[in-house]
Image (spheres, rainbow, N blue to C red):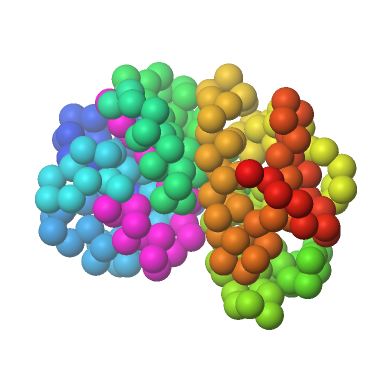
Amino acid sequence: MFKLLLIEDDTTLFHEIKDRLSQWSYDVYGITDFNKVMEQFTDIRPDLVIIDIQLPKFDGFHWCRMIRSHSNVPIIFLSSRDHPTDIVMSMQLGADDFIQKPFHFDVLIAKVQATLRRVYNYNTDKVELKTWCGATIDYEKNTVTHPNGTIVLTKNEVFILKLLIEKKNRIVTREELINSLWDDKRFISDNTLTVNVNRLRKRLDELGLGVFIETKVGQGYMATEEANNYA
């Protein structure tokens, strides 16, 4: 049974979401003290976190940063705000998905199921290590190790990188990436993929590898082993 942590201060909504997700055999936990979110996160050790943006004490962005400093657990944001910068900020902080309130519970359940399936069940064809541009990518540990250092990627980031490297020097279309990452593209904005790829590049830039992920305008993205200016 997967354990889900729902960081939501609206008691009514919390219980509605908990009831719906419990019907799918998920074990849903809530926050009892918003001064001790990280303590409860550590105690629960959830398999997925759902965070509202507007919360007491600190907002959801703060808690996303805190969680990401300790864990690569998948994170889905909830928000009643409709400003595009909220989606961009969420993805830049390492969130896996974003759901705008009000939402249909079928959409929430579909996104939770897709995220859990992708994070915990995706097939790496039993290839745990891959070399690329002088770096070693560990698909099991989600790390990229290079003479310039080691970075830890989120599940979304390593999944995108894996798809691109598998088709190195060939264009992977935006549609293919979206379908592989989120199952049902009806629930995903095109900007969500852009933010995820940009975040991956930013992380790879720490090792000097961001230039090896090229944008093919109007088509998709391509991993190469010859540096080009992608900006």
Label tally:
0
> Looking at this rendering, what residue extends furthest in the bottom direction?
147
Highlighted magenta segment, given as a residue range: 62-80
The residue at the point 27 percent across, 46 percent down is 60
Q: Is residue 74 magenta?
A: yes
Residue 100 makes an appearance in the image:
yes
Tell me residue 129's x, y (percent): 77, 69
Picture residue at 79% right of the left edge, 65% below the top: 132
Q: Which residue is more in the foreground, 173 or 209? A: 209
In the image, residue 101 sits, relative to residue 139, either above or below, namely: above
Q: Quadrant of residue 135?
A: bottom right
Where residue 13 sits, quadrant-wise, is top left
Residue at image position (40%, 42%) is 90
Q: Is residue 92 left or right of residue 145?
A: left
**Residue 229: image x %, image y %?**
70, 49
Asked if residue 37 is among those painted magenta in the image, a careful observer would answer no
Please give the name of the residue rendered at 61% of the width and 53% of the height, measured from the top-left corner.
201
Q: Is residue 163 visible?
A: no
Nearest the eye: 149 or 141: 149
